[in-house]
Image (tube, helix red, strand yellow):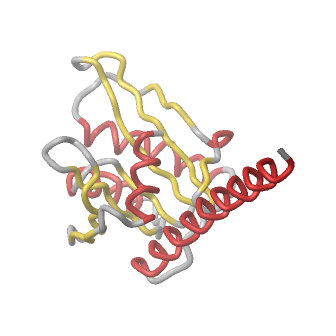
Amino acid sequence: VEKNAETAHRDKFELVKRKQDSKQEAMQELSSIFKKEIHTIEIYDNSHISGAFNVSGMVVFKDGVPSKKDYRMYKLDTYVSDTDSMKEVIYRRFLRLLKEKKPENDLLVVDGGMAQINAAREILDALEIEITLCGLVKDDRHRTSNLMDRNGDIIPIRKDSPLFFLLTQMQDE
């Protein structure tokens, strides 16, 4: 019995270590892609029901781990378009950071392609904020398949990579 408990404890420790190593590897890959240290990531996604109940969610990850205390839900004005919703939430978030003199994150990820990136970039440029920006590119089944940088260039992500699993976890959050 003692031997089984020891083996179970060692197996659990190894699993935790592999998960931690995987998160570190994903963060290193992001840092390599964007040629800067990435520690704090904010990801934004908009939602509505047939134009009603327009909201946006912001999820924060620090060193690959969800920081649930930093999550935010934004109730948005009347729905016009997804890009207008993105502009509104990015404006509200970053204007507040400027007013409160709080630091920005290392990476801003929008859940969408070029239209969402352009919407976020327009607001960031207007507020004169320099921040690394990218978008999640979806496949035909609405699953994350790649990243897109702020210029519209596709950044391929291996489906078996720790970064892919981290991005999927972020999107799921």
Q: Could you tell whether 117 is left or right of 106 in the image? A: left
- Residue lying at the far right of the rendered structure: 2
Q: Position of residue 47 (x, y in %)?
A: 33, 29
Q: Name the residue rendered at 65%, 62% in the picture.
A: 103
- Which of the 4 image quarters holds residue 30? bottom left
Q: Nearer the viewer, residue 3 or 111?
A: 3
Vertical relation: 34 (above or below) 137: below
Q: Name the residue rendered at 39%, 40% in the picture.
A: 88
Q: Name the residue rendered at 46%, 36% in the picture.
A: 57
Q: Name the residue rendered at 70%, 53% in the picture.
A: 12
Q: Could you tell whether 77 is left or right of 58 in the image? A: left
> How many discs mark residues in the rendered view?
0
Q: Nearer the viewer, residue 47 or 22?
A: 22
Q: Could you tell whether 149 is left or right of 169 in the image? A: left
Q: Where is residue 94 in the image (x, y as percent from the top left)?
A: 52, 51
Q: Position of residue 158 (x, y in %)?
A: 30, 68
* Quarter placement of the N terminus: top right
Vertical relation: 157 (above or below) 7: below
